[in-house]
Amino acid sequence: MKIAVFCSGNGSNFQAIADSVKAGDIKADISVMVCDNPKAFAIERAKKLGIETFVTSLKDHKSRQDFEKAILAELEVRKIELVVLAGFMKVLSADFIAKYKNRIINIHPALLPSFAGTDGIGDAIKYGVKATGVTVHFVDAGVDTGPIILQDAVEVRPDDTHDSLAERIHKIEHQLYPRVVKLFVEGRIKIEGRVVKIT
Ligand code: GAR
């Protein structure tokens, strides 16, 4: 199976998935890492991993539609079958998502449907929840609303800062995301309505 991983920043989840592919645990190819931020550290990681990159930012294009068209063309040429959003901070349009229906997955640093949006970690701390976590879900036309594939909980400690909680959340993410990609590649994820079953 040919996979595209989308990143905007650090790319530690991209690294974890690429490491699992290299180790032979996930039997798939990461054909390309798509990045909308030319300064992202994920690009350095891709170079070290020997994975091709497609870097294009929204401001390189006349419109969001053109930006997405350029990315779609890249995916089509490469015959991509699974899109893995790994810290990709642009919301994809309904048209884009329809083209890869049930073939785009995302990781979110909270237990959805709580704390959707751009700062799932900070919002959980501010709210005062005692447990938060990580969610991997299919992407639908809403923001962080698609069918949930797997979740794992993380305790919020009284003295947690954004950084200390983020560190524990990332550790969980780096285990959970490769696990989900492996399940998808092995055809073991079924969607019934909005409920996901692992077979
Ligand atoms: C991850 O914590 C991911 O859950 C989060 O961005 C981080 C990217 O880290 N995604 C979102 O907040 C999406 N709404 P990484 O670049 O090191 O993989």
Image (cartoon, rainbow, N blue to C red):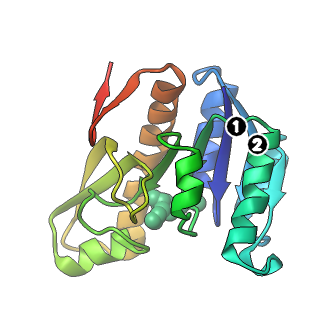
Q: Quadrant of the C terminus?
A: top left
Residue 154 shown left or right of residue 53 in the figure: left
Question: Mark 1 = which residue?
Answer: 80
Identify the residue at horizontal 64%, vertical 20% (top origin).
Answer: 24
Identify the residue at horizontal 42%, vertical 71% (top origin).
Answer: 163
Q: Is residue 47 above or below residue 22?
A: below
Name the secondary structure under disc 1.
loop
Residue 74 shown left or right of residue 99 in the figure: right
- Spot occupied by residue 184 in the image (x, y as percentages of width and height): 49, 28
Marks 2 and 1 sit apart, C-alpha to C-alpha, by 6 Å
CA neighbours of label 1 inside 10 A, class few (<14), some (14 to 19), many (20+): many
Identify the residue at horizontal 59%, vertical 24% (top origin).
Answer: 26
Mark toward the viewer: 2 or 1: 2
- To which quarter of the image does residue 169 belong? bottom left
CA neighbours of label 2 inside 10 A, class few (<14), some (14 to 19), many (20+): few
- To which quarter of the image does residue 130 belong? bottom left
Q: Is residue 152 above or below residue 22?
A: below
Residue 36 seen from this side = no
- To which quarter of the image does residue 164 belong? bottom left
Residue 151 shown left or right of residue 128 in the figure: right
Is residue 163 or residue 138 the one in the foreground? 138
Q: Quadrant of the N terminus?
A: top right
Q: Do the CB atoms of the residues marked 2 and 1 lie less than 8 Å apart?
A: yes
Tell me: is circle 2 under 8 Å from ligand 1.
no
- Spot occupied by residue 18 in the image (x, y as percentages of width and height): 66, 38
At label 2, the amino acid type is Glu
At label 1, the amino acid type is Ile
Question: Mark 2 = which residue?
Answer: 76
Name the secondary structure under disc 2.
helix
Tell me: is circle 1 under 8 Å from ligand 1.
no
Identify the residue at horizontal 76%, vertical 42% (top origin).
Answer: 76
Residue 149 seen from this side = yes
